[in-house]
């Protein structure tokens, strides 16, 4: 009887815990993209002289946690950072490691807008919070 009760409690609790963990990882991914975007704008307005955005090495030198821009992985998400248009623009992707269609992918660029999709996210994906 005790085993059955524990099984019932586990069956009720585990899906909620998985959803909470997914939500936590997604919130972390959004926060990381915001931090990356803020670091890019800080570099742009200082060392970039309002003309160029910074490389990962530039950002790691005082604008952002070096471990974040060099490892490319945090909280079950893989991050990809690209400078485009001769460093006059940037884009950043946060893609979940798990191949689960219910977990969102995130994207931001020099517009500062974070977008998401349930597959690969990009500049035409849904605006977060819209």
Image (cartoon, rainbow, N blue to C red):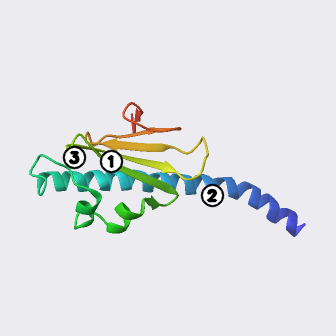
Total numbered labels placed on residues in the image: 3
Horizontal and vertical percent position of residue 20: 57, 55
**Decide: marks 1, 3 in contact (CB < 8 A)?**
no
The quarter in which the N terminus is drawn is: bottom right
Of residue 42 and residue 21, the one placed in the foreground of this image is 42
113 with respect to 12 (left or right): left
Mark 1 element type: strand
* Residue of label 2: 17
Relative vertical location of residue 5 with respect to residue 121 in this rendering, above or below = below
Check if mark 2's residue and mark 3's residue have beta carbons within 8 Å. Answer: no
The quarter of the rendered structure image containing the C terminus is top left
Percent coordinates x, y for residue 90 in the rendering: 28, 45
Specify whether 123 is left or right of 103.
Answer: left
Q: Which residue lies furthest to the right in this view?
A: 1
Tag 3, which secondary structure? loop
In what element is the residue under mark 2?
A: helix
Q: Which residue is denoted by mark 3 in the rendering?
A: 87
Q: Which mark is residue 82?
A: 1
Residue drawn at (75%, 61%) of the image: 10
Q: How crowded is mark 1: few (under 14 residues within 10 Å), some or many (20 or more)?
A: few
Quadrant hosting residue 28: bottom left
Spatial separation of the CA atoms under disc 1 and disc 2: 34 Å
Residue 120 appears at what percent x and percent y? 49, 38
For the residues labelled 1 and 3, the Cα–Cα distance comes to 9 Å
The residue sitting at 26% across, 39% down in the picture is 111
As drawn, the residue found furthest toward the front would be 86
Lower sequence index among marks 1 and 2: 2
**Disc 2 and disc 3: Cα gap in Å?**
42 Å
Question: Which one is nearer the viewer's eye here, 88 or 125?
Answer: 88
Pointers 1 and 2 in contact (C-beta within 8 Å): no
Upstream in sequence: badge 2 or badge 3: 2
Q: Residue at x 49, y 55 (%)?
A: 77
């Amino acid at each position: 009887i005790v085993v059955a009760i524990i099984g019932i409690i586990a069956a009720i609790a585990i899906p909620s815990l998985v959803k909470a963990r997914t939500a936590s990882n997604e919130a972390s991914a959004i926060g990381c993209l915001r931090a990356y975007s803020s670091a890019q704008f800080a570099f742009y307005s200082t060392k970039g002289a309002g003309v160029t955005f910074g490389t990962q090495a530039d950002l790691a030198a005082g604008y952002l946690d070096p471990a974040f821009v060099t490892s490319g992985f945090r909280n079950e998400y893989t991050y990809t950072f690209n400078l485009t248009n001769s460093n006059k623009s940037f884009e950043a992707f946060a893609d979940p490691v798990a191949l689960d269609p219910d977990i969102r992918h995130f994207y931001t660029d020099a517009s500062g807008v974070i977008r998401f999709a349930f597959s690969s996210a990009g500049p035409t994906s849904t605006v977060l919070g819209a």
